[in-house]
């Protein structure tokens, strides 16, 4: 059985959490039909993340 960390990635450290920007705007959940009204942008790593009310985490990495 594969290690779950291979799919999720490492836990963000304190320095990365300080760099997150909270942005207001609708984003759809990737696993259910719930829309989320805010998401977080990591400008250092080019990653957007949001969590729906059901607890599903959606992560999008922007290729540069």
Image (spheres, rainbow, N blue to C red):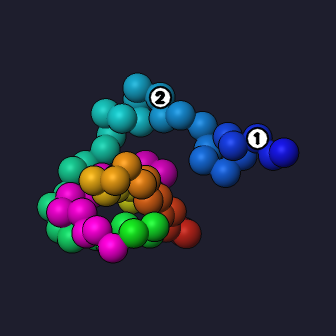
> Magenta stretch containing residue 51, yes or no?
no
Mark 1 or mark 2, whichever is nearer to me: 1
Tell me, for residue 3, which label it has, or none. Answer: 1
Q: At 45% across and 67% down in the image, what residue appears?
A: 31
- The alpha-carbon separation of the residues under discs 1 and 2 comes to 20 Å
Task: Residue 41 in the image: state x and y as whole percent.
Answer: 33, 55
Task: Residue 11 in the image: state x and y as whole percent.
Answer: 53, 34
Location of residue 39 by image quarter: bottom left
Please give the range of residues in magenta. Answer: 33-45
Report if residue 22 is visible in the image: yes
Q: Earlier in the sequence, mark 1 or mark 2?
A: 1
Q: Secondary structure at mark 1?
A: loop
How dense is the environment of label 1, judged by Cα within 10 Å: few (below 14), some, or many (20 and up)?
Answer: few
What residue sits right under mark 2 in the picture? 13
Task: Residue 1 in the image: state x and y as whole percent.
Answer: 84, 45
Report if residue 46 is visible in the image: no
On screen, residue 1 versus residue 54, left or right, reads: right
Task: Residue 17 in the image: state x and y as whole percent.
Answer: 36, 35
By secondary structure, the bulk of the magenta-drawn segment is best described as strand
Tell me, for residue 15, which label it has, or none. Answer: none
Q: At 55% across and 69% down in the image, what residue appears?
A: 63
Q: Secondary structure at mark 2?
A: loop
How dense is the environment of label 2, judged by Cα within 10 Å: few (below 14), some, or many (20 and up)?
Answer: few
> Magenta stretch containing residue 35, yes or no?
yes
Position of residue 28 relative to residue 14, above or below, is below
């Amino acid at each position: 059985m594969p290690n779950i960390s291979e799919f999720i990635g490492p836990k963000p450290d304190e320095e990365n959490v300080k760099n997150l920007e909270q942005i207001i705007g609708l984003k759809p959940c990737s696993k259910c039909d719930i829309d989320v009204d805010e998401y977080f942008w990591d400008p250092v790593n080019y990653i957007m993340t949001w969590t729906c009310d059901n607890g599903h985490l959606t992560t999008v990495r922007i290729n540069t």
